[in-house]
């Protein structure tokens, strides 16, 4: 039976008094690819940043790799960040460095390995993402998909136990998006890592997910396998998964007083 590698325990996060995450609970199981779904403002990206340790919680706790993110010392937090990898939306490459230099940077900063060993490891990581022959190129010479691949090579440079992906398909054409999805699945198999993916791209989500979680307005709504989510009787899940124009999500927007606000303004101006 797989065990949780991450436990999100009644997590609360607020910005300027506004609650973005409201008592969220979920587990990420060791070795799985968990996809976190949700519309804009659902809190999914905030949850990812909290799992990475980039932001502090206002309530609850997150246990990752057996340790509380709330109670880590600065040294423990540094160790934790070395044990995870993150692929940001843009790839977040340093434009003044070649692809190889970008991938080598974490190894140079966080290990005492000799340059010859680092060079070999960089080639291995670039080969895993199909970029070994592009090692000497600058980021400006790369396509969007190649930048994502280079960012992923850097994310796996320290052999992380967990990989976090922030909208990995964002801004990519359908063919390149599919290539990135297959790369995510391939790396999970080859490296044996656990992956947490934040996305609203449903086709991509169903392709890569072992399990899915849906957030809405900062609250946990449902979780399940792709088939379970497709067959869910929860009306919010059903509308989001199938991208329907009618349902509780759009009903809620219509009920937020827009028509009354317009009519009220007209009446005041008449």
Image (tube, grey):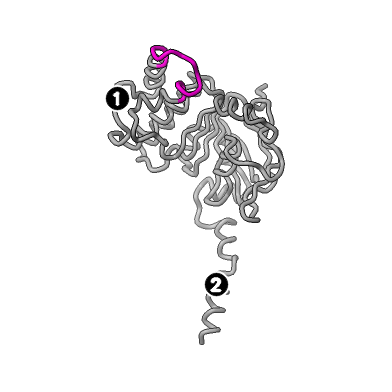
Residue drawn at 47 percent across, 40 percent down: 167
Q: Is residue 117 magenta?
A: yes
**Which SS class for mark 1?**
loop
Please give the label number shown on residue 266.
none
Q: Which numbered disc flags the more N-terminal residue, 1 or 2?
A: 1
The quarter of the displayed image where residue 151 is located: top left
- The residue wearing badge 1 is 136
Q: Is residue 57 magenta?
A: no
Q: Position of residue 27 (x, y in %)?
A: 66, 33
Residue drawn at 63 percent across, 31 percent down: 74
Q: Nearer the viewer, residue 56 or 225?
A: 56
**Which SS class for mark 2?**
helix
- Give the extent of the magenta segment: 106-118
Q: Position of residue 116 (x, y in %)?
A: 38, 12
Please tell me how crowded label 2 is: few (under 14), some (14-19), or many (20+) other residues with Cα within 10 Å: few
Q: Vertical placement of 67 versus 255: above or below?
A: above
Please give the label number shown on residue 259.
2
Q: Nearer the viewer, residue 161 or 257?
A: 161
Residue drawn at 42 percent across, 42 percent down: 170
């Amino acid at each position: 039976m797989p065990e949780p590698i991450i436990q999100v325990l009644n997590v609360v996060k607020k910005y300027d008094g506004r609650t973005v995450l409201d008592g969220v609970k979920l587990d990420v199981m060791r070795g799985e690819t968990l996809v976190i779904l949700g519309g804009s403002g659902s809190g999914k990206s905030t949850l990812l940043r909290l799992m990475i340790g980039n932001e502090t919680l206002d309530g609850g706790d997150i246990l990752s790799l057996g340790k509380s993110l709330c109670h880590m010392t600065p040294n423990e937090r540094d160790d934790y960040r070395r044990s995870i990898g993150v692929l940001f939306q843009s790839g977040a490459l340093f434009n003044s460095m070649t692809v190889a230099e970008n991938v080598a940077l974490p190894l140079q900063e966080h290990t005492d390995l000799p340059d010859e060993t680092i060079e070999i490891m960089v080639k291995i990581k670039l080969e895993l993402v199909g970029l070994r022959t592009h090692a000497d190129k600058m980021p400006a010479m790369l396509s969007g998909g190649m930048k994502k691949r280079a960012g992923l090579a850097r994310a796996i440079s320290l052999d992380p136990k967990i990989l976090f992906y922030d909208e990995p398909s964002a801004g990519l054409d359908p063919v390149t998006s599919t290539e990135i999805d297959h790369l995510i699945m391939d790396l999970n198999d080859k490296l044996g890592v656990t992956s947490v993916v934040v996305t609203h791209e449903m086709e991509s989500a169903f392709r890569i997910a072992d399990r899915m979680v849906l957030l809405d307005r900062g609250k946990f709504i449902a979780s399940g396998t792709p088939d379970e989510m497709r067959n869910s009787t929860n009306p919010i899940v059903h509308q989001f998964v199938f991208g329907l124009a009618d349902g509780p999500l759009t009903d809620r927007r219509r009920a937020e007083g827009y028509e009354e606000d317009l009519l009220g303004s007209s009446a005041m101006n008449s």
